[in-house]
Amino acid sequence: MKTTGGDDTLLPVSSDLDIIKVRQKGRDLAAWADFAILDQTLIATAISEIARNIVTYARRGTIVLKIEEESDRLGLVVIACDQGPGIPDVTQALREHYSTSHGLGMGLPGVRRVMDDFAIESTPGEGTRITMKKWRTKSADAQEQSP
Amino acid sequence: MGVPLIEHDRYLLVPIQSRLTDTELSELRAALLRWVQEQHPRGVMIDVTLLDVLDAYAVRTLSDVGHWARLGGAPTVVVGIRSEVAQAMDRFGLAFEEVATAPNWAEGLRVLAESA
């Protein structure tokens, strides 16, 4: 697997202004890699949710954005890391209806549904690492061709 | 915060001009509810044409505005949701509560007039 699009982008996340900056970077990278406008929006929204979780629960962390290319497909990867309190029960945090009503991990079920790959590693007292990926779809390529 | 609050024909018109942080969204909610309490508009119309992301926090905050404005006697309509943003909301399972939606200002005003 090789990575294209220059160096991985490591972005600090410690304020609500950072949430906007990071999701915009994600959208820009998705647009640069020719993702369809809907997928750009899904990626930006997913980044917004996980960045907010960092600011709310861990106060600070980082998000890495990168493009990964496999033999016949291309994906945008988002890796969010923090050294916050961690999520005591990941299964519960990912359950539909739980997260939204309890605040903890707000929006995570939606993020998992929308991204193609989604993984959480979380250790109470040590932190949380979320890795997620969205593949560029073929139809998106055609749709985004300008005349 | 930088969001103009415009009064027109006793409607409160709110064209959001730029991306808003969570703090700015909360400030906007407070400013709108203060306006509703003091000015008793016939309705509130929020234009989100310039927002390229409506995430859980934004949808909840605007739904809160709808809830409290309704209790203050004013219906709320959100106009100008981009089609990809509407689709993304749907995919994330997000929906406005106690807020009507309309494609543009003319339709938005019609919705407000009808719900009065």
Image (tube, coloured by chain):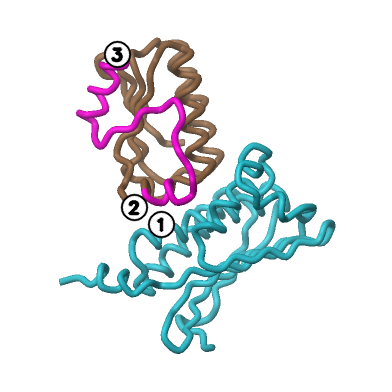
Mark 3 = which residue?
A: B10
Residue A121 visible in the current orientation: yes
Residue at (40% x, 62% y) in the render: A40
Q: Chain of mark 3?
A: B
* Tag 3: amino acid: Arg
Neighbor class of circle 1 (other Cα within 10 Å; few <14, some 14-19, many 20+) is many
**Residue A50: percent from left, percent from top:** 60, 55
Is residue B108 in the magenta section? yes
Q: Which residues are magenta?
A: B87-116
Quadrant housing the N terminus of chain A: bottom right
- Which residue was labeled with disc 1? A41
Which chain hosts label 1? A
Disc 1, SS: helix
Q: Is residue A46 left or right of residue A15?
A: left
Residue pointed to by mark 2: B84
Residue B10 appears at what percent x and percent y? 29, 13
- Who's the residue at 25% across and 68% down the image? A143
In which chain is the residue bearing label 2? B
Q: Is residue A51 left or right of residue B66?
A: right
Which amino acid lies under the numbered mark 2 shown in the image of this protein?
Answer: Glu
| Chain displayed in brown | B
Q: Residues within 10 Å of mark 2 (few under 14, many from 20)?
A: some
Look at the numbered disc 3 and give the secondary structure of its residue.
loop
The colour with which the image depicts chain A is cyan
Which residue in the rendered view is the most extreme toward the right?
A125
